[in-house]
Amino acid sequence: MPSLQQFSAFDYSALPKVDLDDLPTELEQYRQDLLEFTEEELHLLRWRMMWKSLARKKQLPPDEFETLVKTIWGIRTGRGFGKTLAASNWLGGQAAEVPGMYAVVAPTHDDVRYTCFEGPTGLYSVIPACLIIDTNSQLPSCTLWNGSFIRGFAGDTPERLRGPQHHAAWCDEIASWKYPQDAWDNLWFGLRLGEAPRLMWTGTPKPTPFMRRLNADPNGVVIVGSTYENRENLAKAFFDNVAKYEGTKVGRQELWGEILDPEEEGIIQRSHWRMWPAKRKLPKFQLIVMSLDTAYSEKQHDKKRQEVDPTACSVWGMFEYEDDDIDEGLAQKHVMLLDCWEDWLKFPALVKRVKRERRLTYGDADEPLLKPRGIRSADKPRHQGQAIDIVLIEEKASGKSLMQALAVEGILTHGYNPGKADKLTRLHVVSPMWSHNRVWGIESDKTKGEFKNWMDPLITQVCSYIGEGSIEHDDLCDTTTQAMRVFMDKHIGALTIKVDPLETRRQQARVDAERAKKKRDGGNPYDG
């Protein structure tokens, strides 16, 4: 007897309308087979045929997914596209046809129940009622006529996905899960039943690290669609309300399903960073600050995953700079990024590294390239570079310990206490440094017009951060904001200083005359 797949794959639209008692000879066998189907099988067949005739192409599984070339099918679209309806029909159809265990995961318990199961386009709206023999609204879950069990889970409780095994799963509004990576990993560890476990995800995207990784997964095929594709099925009031966002960043995401570049949303744009030419000699720095964000504190420690954030460090140099487009004699204090790194270091190794790097010097050398000058010694005079003047550490659990350990070594540090200000507030406070064009990175000597490679992680964090969870790690961003706050509050002040060109030349002439006299007298012209 032909299978349900064969019937549902048949192109019934090409057949003429005929009475069942007057079928063409070649279809008589199909008629006999249909008479042998149970009532449930006929309802299932009718459901599959109706959905295939009504669905748009993008709502049906792509060929790569159907043929198991890809094991993940994603529908990334704007609101109102019909992705929930597509997922309900796919997962419900799989469960009704192949007995097994199936999972539905949504952001919260209420989302699972009231959208994925009981919603207007949820599972109960598409699965024929006669195929559902039991339901549980508390889990939620349902049992089908063939023994299949579909159970709901919430993305904000990923530990619940540890243990249960499934043949297939549907992940709804995956961009809104509270713990996306944890829930995703635990779900996949349980997708081990049957010969070909598969997963479908649906959602309107957000520019998060998880979503970017998910869309680039080589095992997946992603269908992208817009709100406009389902316009005829949407209420006019709804469409008119959302269509007003056309042409905006919100519209690109919520109408067209586009994953926005996270830096587009940032407070600080990459274009706000000034680039110091690779071939230009570095300036003479007046102050060097090493800024540290240490791991870990209780807030940083993820007890579920037993992981901590890395320790981050950035080094900044303050110097005077006179722009060509500013009146002559007006020199401004600017800041340049000189070094940055992230590393998972145990406490003794962290102390050792800070001690070593504190002895480096930067800038004011013959070479134009940025290179820490190494440990100063008798044969390496002071004028070959500026040493680190301030070691800045946030006063939190491990930061306080580091400050105490360095004090024992005779290294005094400066504590940074942000008070009740959150990370985003701190970034807002120091953002004028960029809007006033006072922050520099250094051009790569290999790729013209781009910053040095090691600077990119810090620049990306600073430009992408728009609040908690917007980027995977924000530690380098923290070191940046605390360093900039020190520069602004204690050293840059009003951001500008006035210089009298004539008086400057006079002072330099007096200095040169004094040095010449010392040299004639046999003394050290640079002494004093």
Image (tube, rainbow, N blue to C red):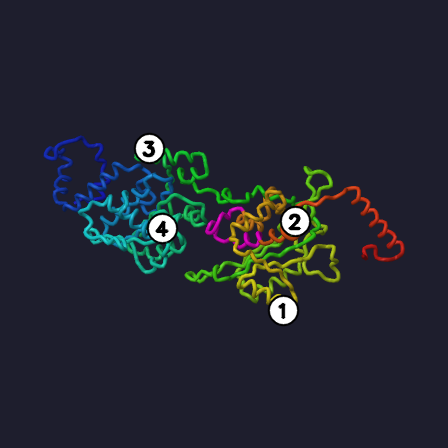
Q: How far from the left and from the top, in percent, is residue 266?
A: 51, 44
Q: How far from the left and from the top, in percent, is residue 478?
A: 55, 54
Residue labelled with disc 4: 107
- Which callout, 2 or 1, points to the residue nearer the camera? 2
In primary-sequence order, the first of circles 2 and 1 is 1
How crowded pointer 2 is (Cα within 10 Å; few <14, some 14-19, many 20+) is rated as: few
For the question of whether residue 196 can be seen, the reply is: no
- Placement of the C terminus among the 4 image quadrants: bottom right
In primary-sequence order, the first of circles 4 and 3 is 4
Helix, strand, or loop for circle 2?
A: loop
Q: Quadrant of residue 302?
A: bottom left
In primary-sequence order, the first of circles 2 and 4 is 4
Helix, strand, or loop for circle 4?
A: loop
Residue labelled with disc 3: 236
Residue labelled with disc 1: 408
Say which of 188 and 332 sits in front. 332
Q: Quick check: is 478 in the magenta stretch?
A: yes
**3D distance between C-alphas at marks 2 and 4:** 46 Å
In primary-sequence order, the first of circles 3 and 2 is 3
**3D distance between C-alphas at marks 1 and 4:** 49 Å
Instruction: Give, as a three-letter code, the residue at label 1.
Output: Val
Residue labelled with disc 2: 493
Q: Are marks 1 and 4 in contact (CB under 8 Å)?
A: no
Q: How far from the left and from the top, in percent, is residue 22?
A: 11, 33
Say which of 514 and 275 sits in front. 514
Point out the stretch of residues depicted in magenta: 463-481
